[in-house]
Image (cartoon, rainbow, N blue to C red):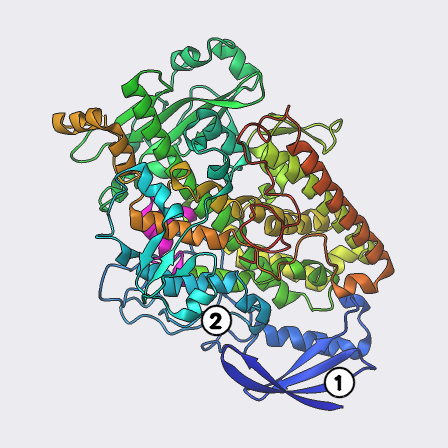
């Protein structure tokens, strides 16, 4: 039977022709813009070795078509999945400024691979792909649904970046205009910012941000105050909140246990100076002396560190050549009090030597004196700008969005849509390639939002390449392995999750382990159903090709690392798939949906530090200016008005759930419902997710858990599974869909 149907996509109209064959459980589709007939298979899953003979050639033919031939520029109606390096972030052909950037991916700058678009190469740099104002190609199956396109979600991000952000700068006298008073910051929520008129279509899909100004052609950007500032106006000033957010904030996966003393750098001392930290035992004891000795604190695992010294120090001198950026290498030491909460002990800021300056480093501690207290506040602002950069470039972009793209490409290229693992992973890959393409277009590109508003400046993506090269390991991306690698947990079979947490009240870990266990149990049931014998895992040629391609192509710059898991047994497959699902659901939710809640009031998490510390080789005049008005020094260090409002607008959208969000454990895929054993297993998974939700609510009401409950505190709900639409600060979608 042949059926013809029109289809609207990306502003174009295409006519498709369907051939349906119910007996074979497949159908074919032909687009008149593409002479290749597309094959659709029934929902029933088959391992390659158990595929009905009539479908085997079609199964192979479909995969061959999806892989393409690696030639030519991709068209928006195609569904070709192929790999390329990140060679489209720079824009060397742009004559207005220096926008050339190195290619990420390869021996010099190792990086995961992205989806190939095949655009022509730059006339000035044959290694760099040209950029376009049109949406970057993604296979047609990866594009947004009609609901997603018109809802407050991913399409909104595109409209914001293209239609609103360029106009924000016009609201101020200059791009570096400062906030002169804290009241100016508060006015962003009370009065808003007037910008010259946006396209009314853009305004219509940004209803929560854009408000039309009556009787003018202008628009008003008026920000909703985040829940944090609504609950406690002064929350961001408290030292205990500064430390608490390392466990229950938007970047709870960087803190690590101090296991050796003194703290040491691994950088070349001939270039960067002595490796020993300036934080001494005596400094620590002055702060914690009322609790225990230094030796007791170290032995009893009470000292923790946020260590960005080695990651940032190589970029300090380079970024200081950029106007409006000051960077340091930093270490932040914290102490676990008997109450189970962290208190900051010391902050070390380091500037390496240069041709015109010797090395400078200084340790700041909490102070009751006026001068010391203000220096401490500004030192915290610097650390928070470092943490904001590592969060956005590493915890968020690299570890979730970027690392996942090769999994998606390899799955489509090697696993037939009939393959059970393809079906299992399908809901966890929804919209990710499209979101990543939007990021390459306007967020992480040269001169884009990230470079313009975060401390590493034009070195942002190069820094993320360093972290990928030095620190990223697939076998540490599973939550239990991540916690163990940072010293935040040890294996203990007597504990509920097989782990004993170093800090018992660690909300990210407490809730994350609930989700991890639920995911792993669901994956275990699924894998055991389709692979009743272990030999079926090793003999599945599609599965083996998938894992081989992820390791040797998608993450090919790390193909020779010894830590890659093998794929021979049930446990191997369960661990690999559980890790991928965790990264795309729980890990991403934990670092994404709280961004506006914790950084919408930017003094709590400034993304950039524009000025050096007041005691960093000051002139007499500069030091006197600081003494006369230290509040102005802090405001000057914060992002400018243009930078702050740009970040606030973007984070508001990134933190927003769309109306068509698909939350983990809520709606089963069609194939899951069709298979009785899988349906039962999914219902058990759904119940574990529901129980997790109840447990989180109970824990948030427990007054003894001081890292998630207390006067003015926002309860930790980033891993609470479900959510209403909007920037709610909770909810775990199946996929990286924003």
Residue at the front extreme, as displayed: 215
Q: Main secondary structure of the magenta part?
A: helix
Where does label 2 land, which residue?
Answer: 137
| Distance in Å between CA atoms under marks 2 and 1 | 29 Å
Image coordinates of residue 5 in percent, x first then y, are: 65, 87
Q: Is residue 200 left or right of residue 579?
A: left
Q: Is residue 614 above or below residue 132?
A: above
Give yes or no for residue 453 being in the magenta stretch: yes
Residue 91 seen in this snapshot: yes
Q: Where is the N terminus found, in terms of image quarters?
A: bottom right
Q: Nearer the viewer, residue 52 or 235?
A: 235
Q: Nearer the viewer, residue 216 or 561?
A: 216
Span shown in magenta: 441-464
Q: Is residue 184 left or right of residue 577?
A: left
Image coordinates of residue 27 in percent, x first then y, are: 73, 81
For image coordinates 44% across by 59% down, the residue present is 439
Image coordinates of residue 163 in percent, x first then y, are: 37, 65
Q: Nearer the viewer, residue 556 or 324?
A: 324
For image coordinates 47% across by 57% down, the residue present is 208
Q: Residues within 10 Å of mark 1 (few under 14, many from 20)?
A: some
Q: Nearer the viewer, residue 664 or 315?
A: 664
Give yes or no for residue 707 being in the magenta stretch: no
Q: Quadrant of residue 139?
A: bottom right
Local SS, label 1: strand
Q: Residues within 10 Å of mark 2 (few under 14, many from 20)?
A: many
Residue 461 seen in this snapshot: no
Local SS, label 2: loop
Res 20 label: 1
């Amino acid at each position: 039977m042949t059926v013809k149907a029109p289809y609207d996509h990306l502003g174009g109209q295409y006519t498709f022709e369907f051939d349906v064959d119910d007996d074979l459980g497949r159908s074919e589709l032909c687009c008149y813009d593409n002479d290749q007939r597309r094959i659709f298979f029934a929902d029933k899953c088959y391992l390659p070795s158990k595929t009905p003979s009539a479908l085997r050639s079609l199964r192979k033919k479909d995969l061959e078509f999806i892989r393409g031939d690696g030639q030519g520029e991709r068209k928006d109606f195609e569904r070709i999945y192929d790999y390329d390096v990140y060679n489209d972030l720079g824009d060397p052909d742009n004559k207005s400024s220096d926008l050339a950037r190195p290619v990420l991916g390869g021996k010099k700058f190792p990086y995961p691979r992205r989806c190939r678009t095949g655009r022509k190469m730059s006339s000035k740099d044959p290694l760099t792909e040209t950029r376009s104002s049109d949406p970057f190609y993604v296979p047609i199956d990866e594009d947004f649904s009609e609901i997603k396109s018109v809802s407050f979600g991913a399409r909104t991000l595109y409209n914001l970046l293209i239609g609103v952000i360029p106009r924000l700068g016009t609201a101020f006298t200059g791009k570096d205009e400062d906030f002169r008073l804290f009241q100016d910051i508060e006015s962003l929520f009370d009065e808003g910012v007037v910008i010259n008129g946006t396209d009314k279509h853009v305004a219509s899909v940004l209803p929560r941000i854009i408000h039309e100004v009556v009787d003018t052609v202008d628009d008003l950007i008026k920000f909703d105050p985040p829940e944090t500032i609504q609950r406690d106006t002064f929350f961001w000033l408290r030292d205990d909140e500064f430390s608490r957010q390392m466990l229950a904030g938007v970047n709870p996966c960087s803190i690590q246990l101090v296991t050796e003393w003194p703290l040491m750098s691994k950088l070349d001392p001939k270039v960067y100076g002595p490796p020993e930290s300036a934080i001494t035992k005596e400094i620590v004891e002055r702060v914690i002396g009322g609790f225990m000795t230094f030796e007791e604190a170290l032995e009893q695992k009470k000292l923790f560190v946020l260590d960005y010294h080695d990651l940032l120090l190589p970029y300090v001198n380079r970024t200081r050549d950029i106007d409006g950026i000051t960077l340091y290498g930093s270490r932040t030491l914290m102490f676990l009090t008997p109450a189970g909460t962290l208190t900051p002990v010391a902050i070390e800021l380091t500037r390496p030597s240069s041709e015109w300056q010797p090395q400078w480093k200084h340790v700041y501690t909490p102070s009751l004196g006026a001068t010391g207290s203000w220096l401490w506040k500004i030192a915290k602002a610097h650390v928070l700008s470092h943490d904001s950069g590592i969060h956005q470039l590493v915890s968020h972009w690299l570890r979730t969005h970027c690392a996942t793209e090769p999994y998606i490409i390899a799955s489509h290229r090697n696993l037939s849509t009939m393959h059970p693992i393809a079906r299992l992973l399908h809901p966890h890959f929804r919209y990710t390639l499209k979101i990543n393409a939007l990021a390459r277009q306007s967020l992480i590109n040269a001169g884009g939002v990230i470079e313009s508003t975060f401390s590493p400046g034009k070195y942002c993506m190069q820094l993320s390449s360093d972290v990928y090269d030095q620190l990223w390991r697939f076998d540490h991306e599973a939550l239990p392995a991540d916690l163990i690698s940072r010293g935040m947990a040890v294996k203990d079979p007597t504990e509920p999750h097989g782990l004993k947490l170093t800090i018992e009240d660690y909300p990210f870990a407490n809730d994350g382990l609930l989700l991890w266990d639920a995911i792993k149990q669901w994956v275990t049931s699924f894998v055991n159903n389709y692979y009743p014998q272990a030999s079926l895992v090793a003999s599945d040629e599609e599965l083996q090709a998938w894992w081989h391609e992820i390791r040797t192509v998608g993450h090919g710059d790390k193909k020779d690392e010894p830590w890659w898991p093998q794929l021979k047994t049930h446990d191997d497959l369960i661990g690999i798939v559980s890790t991928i699902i965790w990264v795309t659901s729980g890990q991403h939710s934990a670092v994404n949906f709280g961004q506006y809640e914790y950084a919408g009031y930017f003094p709590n998490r400034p993304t950039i530090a524009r000025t050096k510390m007041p005691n960093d080789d000051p002139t007499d005049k500069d030091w006197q200016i600081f003494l006369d008005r230290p509040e102005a020094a802090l405001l000057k260090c914060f992002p400018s008005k243009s930078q702050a409002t740009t970040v606030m607008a973007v984070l508001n959208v990134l933190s927003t759930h769309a109306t068509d969000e698909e939350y983990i454990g809520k709606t089963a895929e069609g194939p899951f419902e069709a298979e009785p054993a899988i349906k039962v297993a999914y219902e058990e998974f759904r119940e574990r997710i529901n129980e997790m939700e109840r447990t989180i609510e109970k824990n948030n009401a427990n007054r003894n858990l001081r890292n998630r409950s207390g006067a003015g505190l926002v309860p930790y709900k980033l891993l609470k599974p479900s959510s209403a639409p909007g920037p709610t600060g909770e909810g775990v979608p199946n996929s990286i869909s924003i």
